[in-house]
């Protein structure tokens, strides 16, 4: 049966800055050359879209839309995960997120940084409207996640206080979104206060079920929490009216005798839960595409977000576009492949930096003189 889904589109965050992906026009040409029909543009990357201009100028937005379309691949969605994660931010995390903060704010207190991030969230809503789009993807931010495990025991009322604060920070954004006709779509993601259906449902109670609080579906984050394909299907049916965007991304959870969900602080290649290139993980996307596009008739854009600790960007997006076309249009699925050799580094390197002993000391709460990043000798 025909599918109501659109795409394939490509999220540019992990690829921007690689050769052939350094400007909006280059990204559009490269995306089109790889078979994509649209792009989801990260609003924290000024070279792609200047958020300050996009929030106030429809002329600027039309110019950006025209450039991308002329180069071969239109802008169909926008996202601002990296700035909105600071709308609420625990002191445990705020210094780790400062890579995205302007220089003049890096030494400011957390409250000033969070106020800046709330303003960026408001601008993201306005920019989406000026770009003739009806949604923007975001992270909720973090007040409670460092205390997700209930030991040491939390003081009574802490969870309620955290979600009251989260609601107070986001309600002005939702109200602007209602004025602009834009949905704010949270990616439910460990590390953020909103990480699963339970936390999203709990948050809705604090914001009066605000209709502009929605979701971008990303099942990979549920896979890494130990959920299964049966659980994914139940989630989709439960939240189909709030799901307005979609990241098609694979993942796997393979616990063993030495570890499970928490991962033992290992890097991505050694974690039991990890992101995989599309088709290499445990998510039954043939079934997911059928449920979303045929059974439920949802009008979502299937947007590939490539994250993989084994394959490189070029291989991951080449295979990903073939899989999405197969699941929407019934073309043949690509054959399984081994990772191609590469030296591109990790998929999340865009958010990392060099060893910074001062930052490590501050985050861990130890004197910098006592910071040692070497491994013991065998």
Image: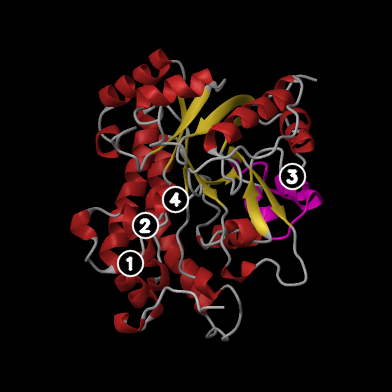
In the image, residue 356 above or below residue 139: below
Which residue is located at x 80 percent, y 20 percent? 1
Q: Secondary structure at mark 2?
A: loop
Find residue 353 and name its label. 2
Q: Quadrant of residue 340?
A: top right
Q: Which residue is mark 4?
A: 349
Which residue is located at x 53 percent, y 40 percent? 342
Specify whether residue 238 is painted magenta.
Answer: yes
Q: Are marks 1 and 3 in contact (CB under 8 Å)?
A: no
Binning the other alpha carbons within 10 Å of mark 3 as few (below 14), some (14 to 19) or many (20 upward) gives many
Q: CA distance from mark 2 to mark 1?
A: 8 Å
Could you say where residue 210 lies in the image, as x and y percent from the top left? Answer: 51, 50
Q: Are marks 2 and 1 in contact (CB under 8 Å)?
A: yes
Which residue is located at x 55 percent, y 84 percent? 156
The tag earlier along the polypeptide, 4 or 3, is 3
Q: CA distance from mark 4 to mark 1?
A: 15 Å
Residue at the left extreme, as displayed: 104
Could you say where residue 309 lies in the image, as x and y percent from the top left? Answer: 59, 49
Look at the image and tell me in which quarter the C terminus lies. bottom right
The residue range painted magenta reads 220-243
Q: Which residue is mark 3?
A: 283
Binning the other alpha carbons within 10 Å of mark 4 as few (below 14), some (14 to 19) or many (20 upward) gives few
Find residue 356 and name its label. 1
In the image, residue 152 above or below residue 358: below
């Amino acid at each position: 049966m025909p599918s109501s889904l659109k795409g394939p589109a490509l999220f540019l965050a992990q690829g921007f800055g690689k050769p052939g992906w350094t400007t909006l026009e280059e990204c559009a040409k490269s995306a089109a050359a790889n078979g994509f029909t649209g792009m989801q543009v990260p609003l924290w990357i000024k070279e792609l879209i200047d958020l300050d201009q996009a929030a106030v100028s429809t002329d600027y937005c039309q110019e950006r839309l025209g450039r991308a379309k002329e180069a071969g691949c239109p802008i169909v969605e926008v996202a601002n995960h990296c700035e909105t994660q600071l709308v609420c931010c625990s002191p445990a995390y705020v210094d780790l997120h400062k890579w995205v903060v302007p220089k003049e704010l890096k030494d400011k207190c957390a409250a000033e940084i969070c106020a800046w991030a709330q303003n960026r969230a408001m601008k993201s809503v306005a920019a989406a409207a000026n770009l003739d789009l009806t949604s923007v993807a975001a992270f909720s931010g973090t007040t409670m996640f460092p205390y997700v495990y209930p030991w040491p025991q939390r003081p009574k009322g802490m969870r309620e206080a955290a979600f009251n604060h989260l609601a107070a920070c986001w309600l002005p954004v939702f109200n602007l979104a209602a004025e602009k006709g834009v949905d704010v779509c949270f990616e439910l993601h460990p590390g953020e206060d909103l990480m699963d259906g339970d936390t999203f449902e709990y948050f809705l109670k604090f914001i009066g079920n605000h209709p502009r609080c929605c979701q971008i579906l990303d099942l990979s984050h549920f896979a890494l929490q130990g959920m299964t394909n049966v659980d994914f299907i139940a989630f989709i049916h439960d939240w189909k009216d709030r799901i307005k965007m979609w990241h098609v991304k694979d993942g796997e959870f393979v616990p063993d005798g030495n570890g499970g969900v928490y991962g033992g602080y290992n890097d991505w290649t050694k974690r039991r839960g990890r992101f995989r290139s599309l088709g290499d993980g445990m998510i039954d996307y043939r079934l997911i595409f059928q449920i979303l596009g045929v059974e439920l008739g949802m009008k979502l854009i299937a947007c590939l977000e490539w994250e993989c600790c084994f394959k490189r960007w070029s291989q991951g997006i080449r295979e990903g576009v073939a899989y999405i076309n197969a699941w929407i249009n019934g073309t043949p699925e690509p054959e399984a492949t081994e990772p191609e050799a590469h030296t591109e580094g990790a998929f999340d390197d865009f958010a990392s930096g060099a060893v910074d002993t001062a930052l490590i000391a501050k985050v861990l709460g130890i004197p910098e003189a006592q910071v040692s990043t070497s491994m013991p000798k065998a």
